[in-house]
Amino acid sequence: MNFFLETLQVLILSLWYNIEAFFRFFIPAKRKNVAGEVVLITGAGSGIGRLMALEFAGLGTVLVLWDINQEGIKETARLAKERGAIRVHYYLCDCSDKNEVYSVADQVKREVGDVSILINNAGIVTGKKFMDAPDSLVEKTMEVNTMAHFWTYKAFLPAMLANNHGHLVSIASTAGLVGVNGLADYCASKFGAVGFAESVGLELLATGKDGVKTTIVCPYFINTGMFDGCQTKWPTLLPILEPDYVVRKIIQAILTDQVFLLMPRSMYLITALRTTLVAV
């Protein structure tokens, strides 16, 4: 009976999240003030990680940038300071290495303080069909795109729980909602990231930690170079997204505590239809 009730609770909460995301189209939510918050962004050395850092720089936040590319995060830090960031700290960190994540996280807590907005953005793609992908690359994809989220949550969530204040952001993908030909390992890793983030969000609600917010972002392919050569068969329904647009929507979702953000908007309909068909 307990299992049945808990399962029913999860289904109801998941349905509520989707209904909430739908109504956000029509009823704009009040934006929260993030001035003084410590924002950690993984994969901040390029792409949307860098663009998010630049957006947060103008909001009075303290930035903590992680990447495996030192020159990349140095450049992001320089640009963020030009945008008016009050403080910027950057660290080399291989998010696929659990011990390195914990070690650098401890350094951040000593040198900067508790992270209050955690954005898991780092990601990789092999770009190979399943049977052509070396085992090492498959493992790396899972380590960066999925398991790294476990380790960063383990490192920074305790302080958020203690304060009942914080925000966990997972930059996933529509490939974490619907399988894509030729991206088996990438899809699996993003399905894992979505499931993990959603489950933690439900745990937070179940334990009364309503001050710790969660946002799961699932964009279609973004024109950042990560998916060079990818094309869409239905450009009107599923266009390749421009980075600036994606980042504006992500920042808006974080500032309004939006639980799910799918891009483009047609993905809400596609996922709803898929869920209905599966249920039938």
Image (cartoon, grey):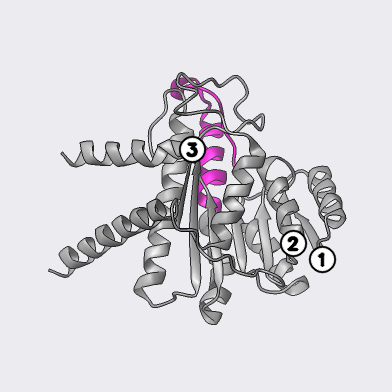
Residue 280, placed above or below residue 194 = above
**Element under disc 1:** strand
**Element under disc 2:** strand
Residue type at mark 2: give it: Leu
User: In screen coordinates, is 217 left or right of 207?
Assistant: right
Residue type at mark 3: give it: Pro
Residue position marked by numbered label 2 in the rendering? 63
Mark 2 or 3, nearer chain start: 2
Q: Which residues are magenta?
A: 122-148
On the rendered image, what quadrant is the C terminus found in?
top left
**Element under disc 3:** loop
Residue 91, placed above or below residue 241 = below
Numbered label attached to residue 264: 3
Report, in whole angstroms, how far the alpha carbon at label 3 lies from the one at label 1: 33 Å
Q: Between residues 45 and 33, which one lies in front from this camera angle?
A: 33
- Magenta-span inclusion, residue 266: no
